[in-house]
Amino acid sequence: MVALGILFIIFTLLSHLRSTEPASGSNQVSHTTISTSPSLRPAPTASNRVDLNGYQAALPDPTASQKQSLPLPTDYAFAKEVGWCERFMGVEYLYSFRDHHKEYCHSGASQLECFKIDFGDGKLQDPFCVADGVRLNEEKYFELSCDLGDESKREIAAFPEFMFGTGTRIILDTHFRIDSSVEKKGAVESLKCGTKTKKHGQRKTAILFKRDGGANMWHSLMGVFSYYLSMDILSITEDGQGIPFFHRNDMEDLQVIWVDDKGPGPYAEMWEFFSTPGKRSLHLADPIEFSECYDRVIIPNPGASNPLWQGDWEPRRCTNSTLLETFRRRIYRQFRVAEPDPEPKPEDGLTVTLIDRRQTRHLDNQDYYIKKLHERFPKLHIQTLDLWAISFEEQLRILRSTNILVGTHGAGLTSSIFIPPRSSVVEILPPNFWHKGFRNLAQLRGHRYFSAHAEERPGSDDWKGSSLFIEEDRFMEIMNIAVKSLYNTGHLNEDVN
């Protein structure tokens, strides 16, 4: 009887083991298994700890339920090709910089690490740099104790110059003094400048940036956007000590220093995104006391290197951008303005916002055309927006409820970044002027884009001219298309005729 009992137990165990084996057969549906077991997750590292949206780690909650869900069939997994759009408009842009950086100092008490992007052809371009162990002397030059060597000197000399005299090489040439002298090494070491012996939160960091925009919305926002992208790249890249080049704790002692002669302008608050709240940006020329020692000095990429500026004379096929969407959400958060409702509601109606240019390229007969629009579409709410007359926060509050953005070619159409998704954008271009930048920008945000060219005028071939004229019937036709294109979006449901 004992032997029979033992045989019964063995038979039961073998049956259970067979029942847990995967079934065979050609008709079986394949699945991809995703483990939620804490023991099988990769350990948090500097590269997977970073949340690019707010520098708050998005790690799994260990107290959450660990119940495993059944996976989707593998038919739902699509191969993702990294084409031009993802390389320049998606997170691959950040990863490429992260994966291509090198040290330029062969010896000395300082370091100079520079990052480049692979454009897909094997050529590394658009360098930006991080200097470690920096002394600011009495003449306000940033000193590095660094032996560059001939090869590094030639490579830095070949760094590109961007429009308006911007770019990493310009800042290095103009504001840095780099050599391997005993005096510089002694000065840096005596001040204990550098990050080697300091933890995050103990590091004094400076951002050096030359703006080219002034109050121009496009130029200004491209500079801010490039700054944000550079900091994101540093936050996902490990330095020689195995920790991120930039960490959220480094915000506690970070100072933005502008090396241009432009005033703060309407977008100054955007430069405080990575700083302690309320810590204003400074000009290098300001008669104030700067720190004599900086552990790190970051030289971000300039605005003209921004991916949105790539290929702006050609129609692009890119229909979304993780980079742009992240930037948009950050700006709304920075100015404490609620993000727009993504879908228009019937009770709200449609709102047309016309960019009111007062100087170059203003629209002739603008007031008359607005009157005709009211007559043709009595339910429309029509407003004008003078970017020079109100603060950027007030602009955001107007743009968040705009469904149709209208303007002549110019920086004001950068506002299409901040209107609700799947809205309409109307651009009136100068005669024979075929710039595609705002067309591509609208497409990245999912907007419907409509364009028309103004009439040619004898003796005027300057696209920056004082005014643009378009016939009434052509203006009304393009507006008719733009308005009716939204009649059946979101909660709206109207016949077009």
Image (cartoon, helix red, strand yellow):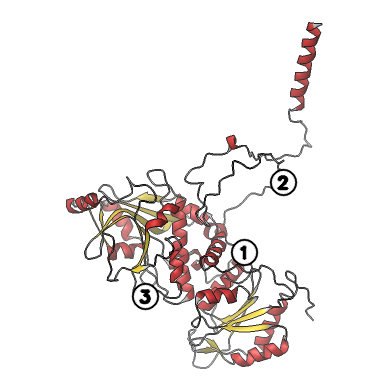
Specify the farthest residue to the left.
Answer: 183
Tell me the tag on residue 319: 1
Query: Looking at the image, which residue is at 65% across and 72% down?
Result: 423
The answer to which of 123 and 145 lies nearer the viewer is 145
Spatial distance from mark 2 to mark 1, Cα to Cα? 24 Å
Which residue lies under the disc numbered 3?
262
Q: Nearer the viewer, mark 1 or mark 3?
A: 3
Q: Residues within 10 Å of mark 2 (few under 14, many from 20)?
A: few
**Percent coordinates x, y for residue 382 in the rendering:** 64, 84
Residue at numbered disc 2: 75
Callout 3: helix, strand or loop?
A: loop
Left or right, 224 with respect to 72, comes to left
Q: Residues within 10 Å of mark 1 (few under 14, many from 20)?
A: some
* Helix, strand or loop at mark 1: loop
Q: Can residue 96 be seen by looking at this rendering? A: yes
Q: Is residue 35 above or below residue 388?
A: above
In 3D space, how far apart are the residues under numbered discs 3 and 2 (Cα atoms)?
Answer: 55 Å
Could you tell me the amino acid type at mark 2? Asp
Tell me the quadrant of the picture where the N terminus can be found. Answer: top right
Tell me: 407 left or right of 182.
right
When asked about the image quadrant of residue 491, the answer is: bottom right
Residue 297 x, y percent position in the rendering: 34, 57
Nearer-N-terminus badge (2/1): 2
Q: CA distance from mark 1 to mark 3?
A: 35 Å
Quarter of the image containing the C terminus? bottom right
Q: Amino acid at mark 3?
A: Lys
Q: Residue at 52% of width from left, 72% of height from top?
A: 313
Question: Can residue 122 be seen?
Answer: no
- Residue at left offset 69%, top offset 85%: 477
Which sits in the foreground, 419 or 61? 61
Closer to the N terminus: mark 3 or mark 2? 2
